[in-house]
Amino acid sequence: MSSARLSGVGVSSGRASGPVVRVAEPLGEPPAVPAPADPAAEAARIRPAADVVVARLHARAANASGDAKDVLETTAAMAADPALLSQAEKLVTSESLPAARAVHQAAAGFISALEAAGGYMAERARDVRDVRDRLVAELLGVAAPGVPSLTSPSVLVARDLAPADTAGLDPTKVLALVTEEGGPTSHTAILARSLGIPAVVACRGVLDLEASALSVDGDTGVVDVSDGTVRAAHVAGRASWNGVGVLRDGHRVKVLGNVGSAADAVAAAAGGAEGVGLFRTEFCFLSASSEPSVDAQRAAYVAVLAPFEGKPVVVRTLDAGADKPLAFLSPEPEPNPALGVRGLRVAFDRPDVLERQLEAIASAGAETGAEVSVMAPMVATAAEAAWFVERARAAGLRRAGVMIEIPAAALVAREILAVVDFASIGTNDLAQYVFAADRQVGAVAALNDPWQPALLRLIKLVGDAGTALGKPVGVCGEAAADPLLACVLTGLGVTSLSMNHTALAGVGAKLASTSFDLCQLAAAGALAAADPASAKLAARAPH
């Protein structure tokens, strides 16, 4: 075993080694028998159990800060979700199920809906599983699954980590994280970066590795058996950034935030974001049984735009379709929803829904003073882009662009940019379409590594088109949150980078330390590489 070496996807920079502590597997499915003698009394156990779980999470949140605090509070809110608890209570009384089994089944419906939604929403299914397991454990009177108490610095190994567990980690005790599942855009990856803990995900076989100590490289994704010597993570301290995205030679690259709620917007503004490169508007549609009115949408958008008065905000129109649980759209069942009627394609049949959303966005922009632009998701051709721009202009929105997340759109980037004001590359979706690899499936997570040369070459096509036509090109996928990759993207012609608020300072500081010619050298090296690991090494050379 001393020569064993595994490889996964490095998602948080740094190197560390030390003794292994394994995280217990999640609870299994609770039994459906015996039926409760008193269903009403059994159902009445559910809300007190939820209250206990919520109180524990709030207590942990009180001792946390930043992104960790946000995640713990969000998980607590999910544990108190009246829809989940009511559904569980109904299952107890209508089907005579034990409370624990009822919670498990009720959560399954929510998990299925989120996974069907794909993309960002599918990644939140892990949060619901965490809440489910905590509630079930409380009802069964057993310890909740999760990270054990650490008495000394250790390398954590798990199948996957719940966001609330990751948020509660002590960086002084956790040397590194290694998970068998997960991907580069998972919540665990994002939180590990914010905590400065080296992390490798999608490391297949790590649970079968009979090693008492491991060495972890969060840059290359390599996990080796070690001799047990504790070596602290070699990571940079918290970056210092003045809030302006500019290279040391004066080359400008805007550093923006990705937001999906008013809380996200406040956090992004506090983190120094120069604006918003991606405002996901799905949050006010997903729980609605009918289409929200123009006034209801406007009010929701105002709350998100308010912290960015006088600053640019790019609003993405509804990214929904037959793969998302929006009943008012009356979607037809599809054999492969990811390749079906979703994103802008929905608007071709229901332009009225798009027109009402554009009206609400324009009104919210006028009310808040934010410099609002709109962009359409899932655009494949220049004709589709032109169709969207025409409707945006009619709604009084002067600046309209599109998402580049379908390979065909990257290949015809010049034609698309000729009819829009800007483009933004969604690297998460673009990668999974390029490699035919679902980003939720750990077995193919390595293909979704944003350092894949094939993905970088597509980005270069778009960057070159933007440079030739004088049109801005942004990146709003998770690739933008990697400081070194941000330099490569800049060298590929990208003019703005949009990311989770925890990554803003690190990216801004990295850009300030380099120059455009070095970014171009790093980009050239990464493009010529044969694989992600080689691309990273080549990009590091000029820096």
Image (tube, helix red, strand yellow):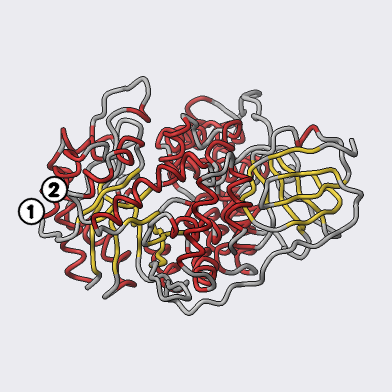
On the rendered image, what quadrant is the C terminus found in?
bottom right
Tell me where residue 253 sits by quadrant.
bottom left
What percent of the width, then of the height, locates residue 364? 20, 64
Left or right for 101, reference 108: right
Residue type, mark 1 in image: Ala
Q: Secondary structure at mark 2?
A: helix
Residue placed at 74% from the left, 54% from the top? Answer: 176
**Residue at position x 62%, y 47% from top?**
162
- Secondary structure at numbered mark 1: helix
Give the alpha-carbon distance from disc 2 to disc 1, as whole Å: 9 Å
The vertical placement of 17 against 202, above or below, is: below
Q: Residue furthest top?
A: 335
Task: Say which residue label 1 marks.
Answer: 394
Residue at numbered disc 2: 355
Left or right of 144, for residue 210: right
Amino acid marked by disc 2:
Glu
Which of the two residues, 7 or 252, is positioned nearer the viewer here?
252
Crowd band around label 1 with a 10 angstrom C-alpha radius: few (<14), some (14–19), many (20+) = few
Q: Are marks 2 and 1 in contact (CB under 8 Å)?
A: yes
